[in-house]
Image (cartoon, helix red, strand yellow):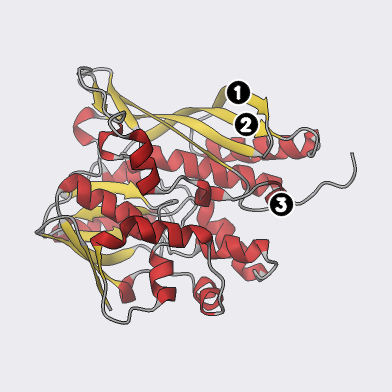
Amino acid sequence: MSAEPRLTSLAHGGGCGCKIAPNVLREILGDLTGAAGHEALLVDAATSDDAAVYKISDDAALIATTDFFMPIVDDPYDFGRIAATNALSDVYAMGGRPIFCLAITGMPLDKMAGDTIKRILEGGRSVAEAAGAPVAGGHSIDSAEPIYGLAAMGLVHPDRILKNNGAKPGDVLILGKPLGVGIFSAALKKGLLPPEGYDEMIAATTLLNRPGADLAGIDGVHAMTDVTGFGLLGHLSEICRASGVAAAVDESAVPVFAIARELAAGGVKTGASGRNWESVKDLVEAPQGWAEASRDMLADPQTSGGLLVSCTADAADAVLAAFREHGHDAATVIGAVTQGAPKIRIET
């Protein structure tokens, strides 16, 4: 085999930016998202939640989810770590603790060396082991583009499941990680990402969303999801739709990587941000003259992004303390849940 091409050059997209647009997905799925008649199935796809949940006993429910994508970086070990962290995030987003995983692997064997594929698997395994959720097996195929991810299982108490449909007017909204990963990814592909930007990207995308398991035990936490491929606006809109509420976002309070903001100001953007915006624009009430770069940042597809939490104002300090305990130092209040039909008002 001749010199291997860059991992990111082998795929048409990368990370959670590969996801099918939410409006297109809703059209495809139609009425296929429910699983009526299965009493033990506590959470299915009806509300676009992060994982399925099945009741095992009065004290335990099984969380099951799967997530996989194409390379967002060129280093195989880092790619594996990011993909695994992202997949495990859906367990944490339901308030659960991961227990084991299965690997999902598709690789173009005519273009990649076995050692490169092994490094991807090793990266994923390292994260899963750190989360206490060993990779117990999996499935692999020879595919046209490199794909890696996990099917992740977790446990949660049936009375402590955190879904995306529980947000209440008067709640505050807390975001756990800064935005800008999509911008970082686009800059990397163009050779425009500085080393310190890459370091920030890897640190954020491999930081497990462990606070989610702790948040399930805090009274006053009403809803939670993680911000990934649909961007902040897309995933917040899912909370609004599922909960039957509106939301207000203070744009100045939303954490954004400074380097990502500079890159965006210089013209770097992702194709998926426009797609994400088209999917939510009818739900967004934006100020007149709102800058396109600002809009794109709130629609920027995040890979292994932060948790988005809806909780009472009284619970906010405890929620932020849980984030800080697990190294999520950027976690902050970004807005509030309000009364009304599903809508997101942007305040600047």
Q: Which of 279 and 14 is in front in this view?
A: 279
Tell me, yes or no, whether the two marked residues, 3 and 2, touch with CB atoms within 8 Å.
Answer: no
Disc 1 marks a residue whose amino acid type is: His
> Quick one: label 3 or label 2, which is nearer the N terminus?
3
Pick the quarter of the image with the N terminus.
top right
Query: Between disc 1 and disc 2, whose residue precedes?
Result: 2
Q: Nearer the viewer, residue 276 or 206?
A: 276
Crowd band around label 3 with a 10 angstrom C-alpha radius: few (<14), some (14–19), many (20+): some
Check disc 3 and give the amino acid type. Ser
Q: Residues within 10 Å of mark 2 (few under 14, many from 20)?
A: many
Q: Residue at x 56, y 71 (%)?
A: 268
Q: Where is residue 137 in the image (x, y as percent from the top left)?
A: 58, 22
Q: Quadrant of the C terminus?
A: bottom left
The residue shown at (19%, 54%) is 311
User: Image height check: is 103 above or below 289?
Assistant: above
At x 26%, y 23%, the residue is: 35
Q: Which of marks 3 and 2 is in front?
A: 3
Q: What residue type is labelled 2?
A: Thr
- Give residue 63's mark: none
Residue furthest right as drawn? 2
Q: In this view, does 337 lie to the left or right of 320?
A: left
Q: Earlier in the sequence, mark 3 or mark 1?
A: 3
**Which residue is labeled 3 in the image?**
9
Across and down, in percent, residue 212 comes to 34, 45
Where disc 3 sits, the SS reads helix
Which label is found at residue 105?
2
Label 3 with label 1: CB-CB less than 8 Å: no
How far across and how far down the image is residue 295, in percent? 38, 70
Instruction: Answer whether labels 1 and 2 touch (C-beta < 8 Å).
Output: yes
- Crowd band around label 1 with a 10 angstrom C-alpha radius: few (<14), some (14–19), many (20+): few
- Which residue is the extreme one toward the bottom? 289
Label 3 or label 1, whichever lies nearer to me, is 3
